[in-house]
Amino acid sequence: MRFNRHDSDAVRRWNAGVSVYDDFEHASRLAADAGFEWIATLTLRVPTSYEVSQYGRDPRHYTIFGDPEELMALVSEVHHVSWPLGD
């Protein structure tokens, strides 16, 4: 974490949060651009024991905080990343 080392919210996001997007195609494009090969789809449940907050300039970006085992249980699918989609 190069920036915001003295911002407790930024440190928490970096150390304890899971970065997610609310749009599969958008997330796939960003993942492909960053060189990631896999992307997971999460199915969120209500009521929750985890926290979801929108963060950053991208209105489709969120951070989820919660128990790691519970968050892993939210994974409903794993996809190989290819962009443009369908390649």
Image (spheres, rainbow, N blue to C red):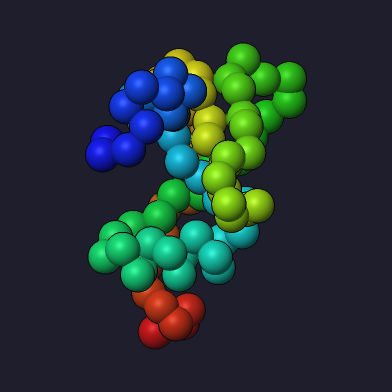
Front in this rendered view, residue 1 or 71: 1
Residue 13 position in % (x across, y down): 44, 29
Estimate the x, y position of residue 39 in percent, counting from the top left: 40, 55
Observer able to see residue 31: yes
> At 58% across and 20% down in the image, what residue appears?
50
Identify the residue at image location x=38%, y=62%. Answer: 31
The residue that appears at 41% across and 78% down in the rendered structure is 83
Q: In this rendering, is residue 24 above or below 47? A: below
Horizontal side of residue 9 vs 55, given as left or right: left
Q: Residue at x 27, y 36 (%)?
A: 1
Where is residue 42? Give x, y as percent: 54, 42
Q: Nearer the viewer, residue 11 or 86?
A: 11
How many numbered tags mark residues here?
0
Q: Is residue 46 above or below residue 24?
A: above
Quadrant of the frame with the C terminus: bottom left
Image check: 29 left or right of 42? left
Residue 59, image x and y in percent? 65, 52
Query: Residue 10, relative to residue 26: is it above or below?
Result: above
Q: Is residue 15 left or right of residue 71?
A: left
Q: Is residue 70 visible?
A: no
Splitting the image into 4 quarters, where does residue 36 fall? bottom left
Whether residue 32 is situated above or below residue 72 in the rendered picture:
below
Q: Quick one: which residue is furthest to the right in this view?
A: 46
